[in-house]
Amino acid sequence: MEKHKFGFMFEPSYELEVQLLFGALMPHIGGFLNELGLGSELYVDVSSGGFPDCVLQVNGERVRVEFELYSSNFVDHGHDPEKCDMIVCWIHDWYSCPESIKVLELHKVVPELAKNGIKIIINDHPKYENREGRRWSIEEFIECSKQNLPEKDYLQVKSFIQELKDTRGIQIMTGKGKKIPTLGIGFGKLSAMEYPLVMQANGKAWIAYKNVNVKPPEPMIEEEKAKKIMRLTGGKSDKWHNIEASSTGELIDKLRQVVRVMLDISEQNTKK
């Protein structure tokens, strides 16, 4: 029988291409699903085109799957985490993804299969590079901070990001596009997440009390907390303002104070 060659010329640039790639990889990904604790026997039950995109039967268990180019698009699309069991994506960049959702990152699966002679993507880059549509990674944010800040300040920023990751009740999300990476800090339910506190990789930060992109502006922070934060940060506007500081250390101290106000906890109980 003639041996056919098939696959993809380029890495995925769209969600639909992630779905097609997953279908092509189904005979080879049982081990990766095992690592996620799901099992290796998988069948498509239904693919409806709604949310979730697909339901799999994995070792006889029903698994609700959402396909995304970047896992953080799950949040952008306003999906409910309680109605999904697994995200299949090309790049996993949702750093606060709840533990209840398994994530299969095909960007890591593909090169592992290639080591075993299963090379399904010819060119290791997308056909269409869309900087505006791609989120910065945490690693890119940290690297840009390293380039823009003195070493002492950069190390403080790096340490603070790890502190945010280790703090209960906080969700972090890198921004899209722009010349300088940003990092949003959110508080609340994942299904309705907003990120009122924002850091830039150049040592600046700001806070938004209201969403000014809608008319009339909608509150992002309850009034009493907003007033307290304004006093702590020296803000003058009740919509948004830059958080002024004479040093990176002072800025991070102010950001910590904002976190404590938003989470209603004392300094001693900020960490897990």
Image: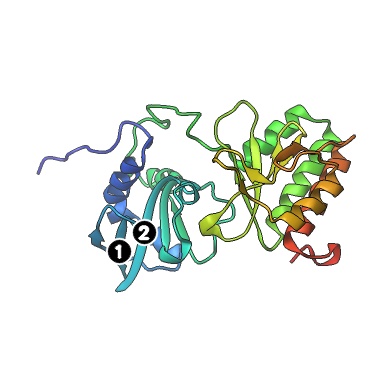
Residue designated by label 1? 56
Identify the residue shown where x is 73% and y is 33%: 145
In the picture as drawn, the residue positioned furthest to the bottom comes out as 60
Separation of marks 1 and 2 at Cα, in angstroms: 7 Å
Identify the residue shown where x is 90% and y is 34%: 246
Task: Determine whether 33 is above or below 14 in the image.
Answer: below
Q: Quadrant of the N terminus?
A: top left
Task: Determine whether 261 is above or below 135 in the image.
Answer: below
Secondary structure at badge 2 equals strand
Local packing at callout 2 (Cα closer than 10 Å; few below 14, some 14-19, many 20+) is many
Secondary structure at badge 1 equals strand
Indicate the amino acid at tag 1: Leu
Q: Does the image show residue 59?
A: no
Residue 156 lies left or right of residue 179; in this view the side is right
Image location (x, y in percent) of residue 85: 42, 64
Indicate the amino acid at tag 2: Val
Identify the residue shown where x is 77% and y is 48%: 160
Image location (x, y in percent) of residue 190: 55, 58
Task: Determine whether 23 is above or below 59 in the image.
Answer: above
Residue designated by label 2? 65
Task: Determine whether 32 is above or below 237 in the image.
Answer: below
Residue 13 lies left or right of residue 272; in this view the side is left
Local packing at callout 1 (Cα closer than 10 Å; few below 14, some 14-19, many 20+) is some
Q: Are marks 1 and 2 in contact (CB under 8 Å)?
A: yes
Image location (x, y in percent) of residue 191: 51, 58
Image location (x, y in percent) of residue 153: 83, 37
